[in-house]
């Protein structure tokens, strides 16, 4: 019985976490990839205009301690959204990958006196 109680606690917590995932489906998370050395220069990619599509530029990744180029790709445009490219950001002497993604298009309000 005691074993069952020890097992049920973590299972309930995990279940609650998974049940809350659909609520965060529209949110964007940051990928934690911490790197100390500098990033190689970006590779040149040939992009051909495709109506109704947006080109998402490739970027360097570091999955197992070595730099690997992830090539760009097309995504279908989304009305009322803008794509924000992912980027490497320097924080406390290390590089951290910040995922890109679709964001709602902002509105500009101009007020006159």
Image: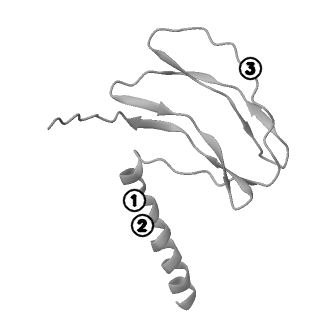
Question: Which image quarter is the C terminus in?
Answer: top left
Q: Are marks 1 and 2 in contact (CB under 8 Å)?
A: yes
Q: CA distance from mark 3 to mark 2?
A: 45 Å
**Number of callouts:** 3
Residue 3 in the image: x percent, y percent? 57, 86
Q: Is residue 94 above or below residue 27?
A: below
Q: Is residue 59 above or below residue 32?
A: above
Left or right of 86: which side holds 51? left
> 10 Å neighbourhood of mark 2: few (<14), some, or many (≥20)?
few
Residue drawn at (19%, 36%) of the image: 111
Helix, strand or loop at label 3? It is: loop
Q: Which quadrant holds residue 34? A: bottom right
Q: Is residue 7 above or below residue 45?
A: below
Q: CA distance from mark 3 to mark 1?
A: 40 Å
Helix, strand or loop at label 2? It is: helix
Residue on which disc 3 sits: 44
Residue on which disc 2 sits: 16
Helix, strand or loop at label 1? It is: loop
Q: CA distance from mark 1 to mark 2?
A: 6 Å
Left or right of 54: which side holds 26? left
Residue 101 in the image: x percent, y percent? 50, 37
Residue on which disc 1 sits: 20
> 10 Å neighbourhood of mark 3: few (<14), some, or many (≥20)?
few
Residue 40 in the image: x percent, y percent? 81, 36
């Amino acid at each position: 019985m005691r074993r069952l109680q020890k097992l049920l606690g973590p299972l309930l917590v995990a279940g609650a976490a998974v049940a809350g995932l659909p609520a965060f489906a529209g949110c964007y998370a940051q990928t934690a990839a911490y790197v100390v050395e500098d990033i190689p220069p970006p590779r040149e990619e040939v992009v051909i205009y495709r109506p109704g599509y947006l080109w998402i530029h490739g970027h360097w990744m570091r999955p197992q301690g070595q730099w690997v180029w992830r090539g760009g790709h097309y995504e279908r445009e989304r009305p009322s959204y803008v794509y924000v490219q992912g980027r490497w950001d320097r924080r406390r002497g290390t590089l951290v990958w910040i995922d890109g993604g679709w964001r709602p298009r902002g509105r500009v309000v101009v007020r006159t006196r």
